[in-house]
Image: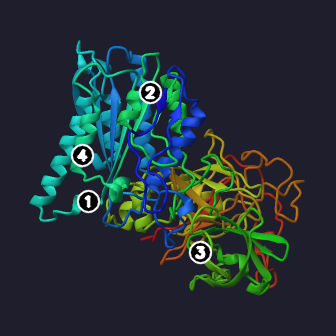
Amino acid sequence: MLLGPAHRRCLETGRWSGPEPSCRHPYAYDLPEDVSEGFGASLTSVLELAGARPHNDSSLGRRIVLSSEGSLHVYLLLDASGSVRSENFRLFQECGAAIVDRLSSFEVAVSFAVISFASRALVIVSTAEDESADADEVLHRLENMTFTDHGNATGTNVRGALMEVYHMLLFQKARAERMGHPDSWRHVRHVVILLTDGRFNVGGHPRDMVAKIEDVLEIKPDREDYLDIYAFGVGALEVDVAELAAVASHRRDETHAFKLADAAALRQALEAALVATTLGDLCGVIVPAGASRPPWHVILRAGREQRCAGSLVGGRWVLTAAHCFLGGPAPHAWTADLGEGDLVPLQRWVLHENFDVRAGVSRGIPEFYDYDVALVELEREVGTRGTPRRVCIPCTEDANRAMRKPPGMTCEEQEAELLGRPRVPAEFVSLDPQRMGVQIKRQEAWAACASGATQPGTPYAEAALGEVVTDRFLCSGQESGGPPEAATCKGESGGSLFLERRHRFIQVGVVSWGTFDPCRGGTAHGRGGSCFDPRPPPDTDPAISTSASSASSRGCAGTWGGSSPSPPCASADPGRDPHPHNKACAPPPRRELPSRVSRCRLFPAG
C-alpha cells in the first residue's frame, strides 16, 4: 500500500511540502528503535528551546521557538475499547505517564489533557482546568483512571476523542477573547498523541474532526508548526496504517504515524524517544540519564595535577572551594578540564570575602573552613548547549522551573522543598569519575552527624562543635546500622553535592574538607587524579571525613559524611602548604559512630 499525504504543495524554496509517499506492507510493524528515533527527532524539534544563540541553519530541520509568551498543550488520547484489554490499557497509562513526567521536566510551559475513549470519550484532565499545568495532579488522575470506566461501551471512537480536543480549543479561544487577549491563543503550540489498538468503528471518520481542529487553529503553510498529531497503532492485524496516516500530521522528513507489535513495544519506543538529546540551555540535565560524569562536573588542574573539582554554573563561571587556591600558582597556570579533552585556561578566581582558614587558630582550631567557596572565571564561555552543561543552583528561577514550581517561590520555600526531610538522598562525583550516593542529615539527625567533627583523635577534639561546624554546613555520612554511604577522597574538594528532582539536578553544596581520606590507604592517585584501587567501603575505618561547602551571601558551612577529599591535620600550615588537605593524618581510633562528611550548603543560613 502507498502511504503519504493526499496533497503536496510546491513551496517557495523549491521543495515539496510533506513527506514523500512510501510503500508499506499492510501487516508490517515498526521496530521500537525506529519509532523512538523518528518520534524522538520530531518531538525534540517541537520542544527545543531557542537559547541565547538561535540556530538559523535550515539544514538543522524544523525548529519551534517557544518565546516567553508561548506555551505547549499536549493531548493524550488513550484507547480503552474492548479489544485493548486491561493489561494493555495499563501499559497505555504508563506510556502516558512517561510522556507527562518527561515533558514537564523541560523549561516549557506545558498543559496536559488526558482523554480516555471507547464508544464515547471521557475527559480525565482538560486544558480548561488550572490543574492541567500541574504535572503531579495530571499524573495522579492518569494513574487512577481505570479500564472499567467505560462499562459495556466497548467501541473505538477516535473521532469522539478528537472532538473533545476541538471543544477545548474553542474554549481557549473564547477565554482569550473574554480576558482581552484575543490573539494569545496564537502563541500556543498543540501536540496530540493518539494511542490505539485498531480501526475506529464508532462515531465516523476522524479525519473530518482533524480538519475542524486545523481550521480553528488556522493551520496554514505559515502555521503548520502549531499542530502536531502523532498516531500510534498497537497490536493485532486490524490496525489500519492508512487510517492512522489519515489522522496524523504530515511533515517533511518526519514521521507521525507508527504501528507497533504490542503495547510493550510502544512503551519501549516512547521511553527511548523521551530521552531527549537536544535540550537547549537547560540546567541540571544529564544525557544519557545514567551517565557517570555529570555535564557540569569540572576538574581543576594546576599543571597536570588534579587539585580540586568544581561545577559549571554559568557560561564561563565555575563554583568550587576557596581552599583549593591557598598558596597555589597563579590562575594562568591552571586549567579547567570539562571532559572529552576540552581544557579551558582560568582567567581569575574570586574567594568568598569571609573565608580565612586561619581565623580559628586563636581558639585552638588549626584550620577553619567556614565560607569555603569560590567562583572561577574561565577564559571563554562554555556550556550553553549540549556538553558541558551548567547545573541548577537554588534560589533561582531556573531551580523553580526545574522543580515545576510557580514563579516567585522564595529561597526559604526552595530549601524546605529540597532539604525539608531528616535524611535527603544526594550525590557527589568521585575522582574516577563516578556518581556516589550519600544521605544529607537534617533536623534532629544533623547534631549527631556533625558531632563526628570533634570526636577524640580529630584535630578539633578540644574545640566546641559550633565553632568548627557552623550552621552553614550540611552533614552527610555513614550512620551506625544505616544503609551504606559513599565517602569522598582527597582531590574531590570543590565538587558538587546535588539532588535529583524530576529528571533535573540541583546543586545544594560544595565538597570542602575532612579529617580522613579513604583513598589514601594503598590507593594510587595518578596524574589524572583517579583512584585506581577500589574505594574502601565507608565503614571500614570510621573516621572524620570530608566536608562540602556552599555559595551564599552568608558563606558556607560543613556537612559530615563518609569520606574526605583531603585530611586537614593539626600540624598543617596553610601558609606554607598550597593545598592543606594534602597532609596525611593518622586515622583516629575506631569508634562506635561511623565517619562523617562536611559540606557547605548553597542556601543562606539564618
Alpha carbons under labels 3 and 4: distance apart: 49 Å
Query: Which residue is denoted by mark 4 in the rendering?
Result: 127
Q: Please give the name of the residue rendered at 60% of the width and 70% of the height, measured from the top-left corner.
A: 468
Q: Element under label 1?
A: helix
Secondary structure found at label 3? loop
Give the mark nearest the N terminus, 3 or 2. Answer: 2
**Amino acid type at image mark 1:** Arg
Of residues 13 and 280, which is closer to you in this image? Answer: 13
Q: Nearer the viewer, mark 1 or mark 2?
A: 2
Element under label 4? loop
Mark 2 belongs to which amino acid? Val
**With respect to residue 498, does 261 lie above or below?**
above
Q: Is residue 383 visible?
A: yes
Q: Which of 250 and 409 lies nearest the eye of the viewer?
A: 250
Question: Residue 55 in the image: x percent, y percent?
Answer: 52, 68
**For residue 241, which numbered disc appears in the image?**
2
Residue position marked by numbered label 1 in the rendering: 186
Name the residue nearer the viewer: 588 or 31: 31
Give the mark nearest the N terminus, 1 or 2.
Answer: 1
Q: Amino acid at mark 3?
A: Asp
For residue 274, say whether it is visible: no
Residue matched to label 3: 370
Determine the residue positioned at 39% across, 61% down: 400
Residue 508: x percent and y percent? 53, 62
> How far, Cα to Cα, is label 3 from label 2?
65 Å
> What amino acid is labelled 4 in the image?
Thr
